[in-house]
Image (cartoon, grey):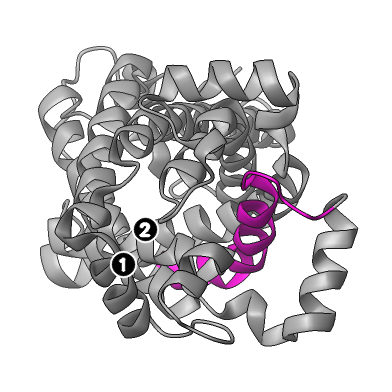
Amino acid sequence: MATVEMSEIKGKDEEPLEGEGDYESLPPHASLTIHMTAGAVAGILEHTVMYPVDSVKTRMQSLQPDPKAQYSSVYEALRRIIQTEGLLRPLRGLNITMLGAGPAHALYFACYERVKCTLSEVIQNGGNSHIANGLAGCVATVLHDAVMNPAEVVKQRMQMYNSPYRNLLDCVRTIRHTEGLAAFYRSYSTQLAMNIPFQAVHFMTYELMQERLNPHRQYHPGSHILSGAAAGAVSAAITTPLDVCKTLLNTQENVALSSMHISGHLTGMANAFRTVYRFGGMAAFFKGIQARVIYQMPSTAIAWSVYEFFKYFLTKQQMEGEAGTAGPV
């Protein structure tokens, strides 16, 4: 029976060369289905496990929060939300997030792996290239956000304090009837402007950490967790100002916009930047940074560790199935 243990694939007496024969390249490349399945599972778990912190982040980024929704820390916010609004309130909007995260992350990881492989062949003759990793992350982000942006709009409106929507369908119908379908993509340009640098830094940091912690690119859960956490923390902190603008465009915070004498709906990244700056100066661009980093570190660690595990497991199953079909030599 054939297996995909790294030492057995390479031979018991052969030391693996750095950058060669990694498990993700068996047999010789994991199939598109494997990448999409692993990505979908990783994406759903990434957004689900840390969702309550994401709810807190959305509220902490409010430019003019209700006095009852002003929080000094993530812990205090979660405690007060549960005490005053119920145990399940931090999970409001989770359903639409799960519906969007599965297909969005399936496209995201599948696209990343394929583009990274293609560009690495061109730039580095098949070796690891930080430029290829960053560009692949940018291309994957365009597809991911096209699927995820409408879900983000609905999610953040349901997360806000005193959200007027009864449920998911009520939120979708109300937005469509009062603001039109374009409202679901009002923040798309800002989302891309945030996520393209976010993912470029994210993937480059992850691959750089892997070079240090796991140079032979074997399946090593500890290195995937640490690399993912570091990548999430760095990229989240850097892109927080853009996330604040995205939240404003998604939520169309009525109290804040009215106080700035802005009528109608706020559109465009430039207008969002001006509004945030007028409201609170440079400090306003970093509202919720603590919650954002706390959310992203474990989320990306979970996403990468789950993705790498499923990629390893599914590739191993595929190899064993092919060996069984071929029969003994």
Dominant SS of magenta comes to helix
Mark 1 to mark 2: distance in Å?
8 Å
Disc 2, SS: helix
Residue 86 image offset from top left, x and y in percent: 75, 21
Residue 239 occupies which quadrant of the picture? bottom left
Residue 289 image offset from top left, x and y in percent: 29, 41
Q: Is residue 329 left or right of residue 142?
A: right
Is disc 1 in contact with disc 2, using a CB cutoff of under 8 Å? yes
Q: Is residue 305 left or right of residue 290?
A: right
> Bounds of the magenta span?
140-165
The residue at which mark 2 appears reads as: 244
- Labels 1 and 2: the sequence-earlier one: 2
Q: Amino acid at mark 1?
A: Val
Residue 129 image offset from top left, x and y in percent: 14, 57
Q: Is residue 256 visible?
A: yes
Tag of residue 190: none
* Residue at point 87%, 50% (across, down): 166
Q: Local crowd at mark 1 within 10 Å, few (<14), some, or many (≥20)?
A: many
Front in this rendered view, residue 23 or 84: 84
Q: Is residue 111 left or right of residue 160?
A: left
Q: Which part of the image, by quadrant, shows the N terminus?
A: top right
Q: Amino acid at mark 2?
A: Val
* Residue at point 47%, 83% (across, down): 262
Residue 250, compared with residue 289, is above or below; it is below
Disc 1, SS: helix
The residue at which mark 1 appears reads as: 276
Q: Is residue 136 visible?
A: no
Residue 121, compared with residue 215, is above or below; it is below
Residue 165 occupies which quadrant of the picture? bottom right
Front in this rendered view, residue 121 or 274: 274
